[in-house]
Image (cartoon, rainbow, N blue to C red):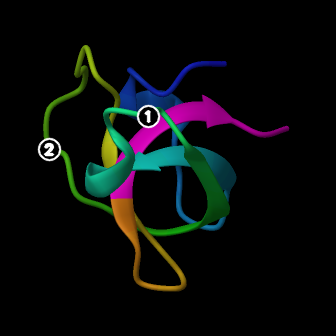
Amino acid sequence: MNGQERKYISTGQKVSIVLKKDQRSGTRTEGVVKDILTNASFHPHGIKVRLENGQVGRVKEIIV
């Protein structure tokens, strides 16, 4: 699943995100969602979240 729709993302879920500094390279970081920062129901580049370790980025994949 991709991370463009907010309804599929919830706190405590494991996701793969791209950090702001890694946007050019596309390097992904995995972690558990602590907060959902995007208020919109959809974002073309991915919903922005904060992971439990404090890192912030846009969700590229939801890990099931």
In the rendered image, the vertical position of residue 11 relative to residue 16, given as above or below:
below
**Residue at coordinates 28% horizontally, 22% vertically from top-left?**
45
User: Percent from the top left, x then y, of residue 30?
Assistant: 67, 57
Mark 1 lies on a secondary structure that is: loop
Q: Nearer the viewer, residue 22 or 38?
A: 22
Mark 2 lies on a secondary structure that is: loop
Amino acid type at mark 1: Ser
Does residue 30 appear anywhere in the picture? yes
Q: Is residue 48 left or right of residue 53?
A: left
Give the number of the disc on residue 25.
Answer: 1
Query: Where are the magenta residues, as a range?
Result: 57-64
Q: Is residue 44 left or right of residue 53?
A: left
Neighbor class of circle 1 (other Cα within 10 Å; few <14, some 14-19, many 20+) is few
**Residue at coordinates 46% horizontally, 39% vertically from top-left?**
59
User: Percent from the top left, x then y, of residue 55?
Assistant: 40, 74
Residue linked to disc 2: 39
Residue 47 covered by magenta stretch? no
